[in-house]
Amino acid sequence: MAKIGVGLNVIGIVLITLVAIGWLPIAWGIEVGTLPAEFAEAFQG
């Protein structure tokens, strides 16, 4: 039963990651490959 629980946790983590990478940028209009200007300025300045 513990093995099944670990497998379900791994599947859940993978699905959540895929949704975050695949659907959220489309829904929110985010460019995944670019950093926000404020973020870049904070680390370059």
Image: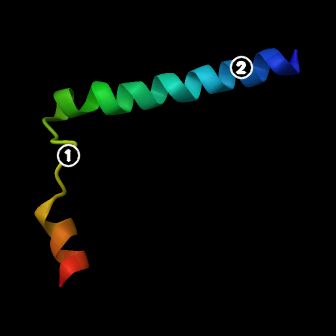
**Mark positioned earlier in the residue sequence (2 or 1):** 2
Q: Residues within 10 Å of mark 2 (few under 14, many from 20)?
A: few
Q: Give the residue pinned by disc 2.
A: 7
Colour mode of the rendering:
rainbow
Question: Residue 4, image x and y in percent?
Answer: 79, 15
Is 14 displayed left or right of 21 in the figure? right
x then y, percent, for residue 22: 30, 26
- Secondary structure under badge 2? helix
Q: Quadrant of residue 41?
A: bottom left
Q: Quadrant of the N terminus?
A: top right
Residue 44 or residue 1, whichever sits in front: 44
Give the answer, above or below, for where 11 lies relative to 21: above
| Image position of 34 with respect to 42: above or below | above
Could you tell me if the residues under marks 2 and 1 are in contact, i.e. CB atoms within 8 Å? no
x, y percentage for residue 38? 15, 68
Pick the residue in front: 38 or 40: 40
Name the residue at the bottom extreme: 45
Look at mark 1 in the image and give the residue it sits on. 33
| Quadrant of image for the C terminus | bottom left
Q: Amino acid at mark 2?
A: Gly
Q: CA distance from mark 2 to mark 1?
A: 31 Å
Q: Quadrant of residue 9?
A: top right
Residue shown at the point (40%, 26%) measured from the top left: 18
Give the amino acid type for the residue marked by disc 1 in the picture. Gly
- Which of labels 2 and 1 is toward the front? 1
Secondary structure, mark 1, is: loop
Residue 30: x, y in percent? 16, 40
| Residue 20: assigned label | none
Q: Residue at x 11, y 64 (%)?
A: 37
